[in-house]
Image (cartoon, helix red, strand yellow):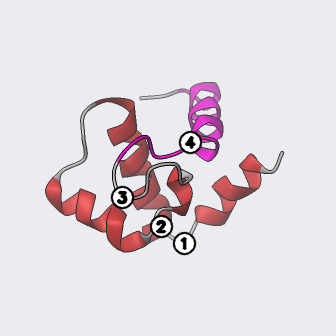
Amino acid sequence: MLDQDQSKQFLLKLANTKMPYGKYEGRYMIDLPEYYVVWYKNKGFPKGQIGEMLATVYELKVNGLEELVRRLRKR
């Protein structure tokens, strides 16, 4: 479990991280199409930090909260 400061740092990093591979390489992870993130959810997220970020993006998109992360990028 992340503490509050770690959660903030994770979301800031997520806001500024681009997809490192695949069809949407170079696109900010929060801007990945929803169907692509759902595909990963069904397939199984990769191990490591990219998988954690994709899982977080999935939860944010399901709950309509992507804009919160996009605002972090603009700071």
Tell me the crowding category of disc 3: few under 14, some 14 to 19, or many 20 or more residues within 10 angstroms, Cα based: few
Give me the C-alpha separation between circle 4 and circle 1. Answer: 16 Å
At label 1, counting other C-alpha atoms closer than 10 Å, the crowd grade (few under 14, some 14-19, many 20 or more) is: few
**Residue at x 44%, y 69% (from the top left corner):** 33
Q: Which residue is mark 2?
A: 61
Residue 13 is a magenta residue: yes
**What distance separates the C-alpha of mark 1 from that of mark 2?**
5 Å
Q: Residue at x 38, y 38 (%)?
A: 50
Which of 36 and 22 lies nearest the eye of the viewer?
A: 22
At 43% from the left and 57% from the top, the residue drawn is: 24
Left or right: residue 45 compared with residue 53: left
Identity, as a three-letter code, of the amino acid under mark 2 = Lys
Give how far apart the Cα atoms at labels 1 and 3 are.
23 Å
Query: Which badge, 4 or 2, comes first in the chain's sequence?
Result: 4
User: x%, y% of residue 75?
Assistant: 84, 45
Left or right, 43 with respect to 68, comes to: left
Residue 36, position as x, y percentages in the image: 34, 66
User: Which label belongs to residue 14?
Assistant: 4
Evaluate if marks 1 and 2 touch, with contact meaning CB atoms under 8 Å apart: yes
What secondary structure is found at the residue carrying circle 2? helix
Secondary structure at badge 3 equals loop
Q: Which residue is mark 3?
A: 23
> Residue 64 lies in what quarter of the image?
bottom right
- Residue type, mark 1 in image: Gly
Q: Which residues are magenta?
A: 3-21
Seen from the viewer's position, the closer of residues 15 and 56 is 15
Residue position for label 1: 64
Q: Earlier in the sequence, mark 4 or mark 3?
A: 4
Determine the CA span between mark 4 and mark 2.
13 Å
User: Does residue 4 appear left or right of residue 41 in this picture?
Assistant: right
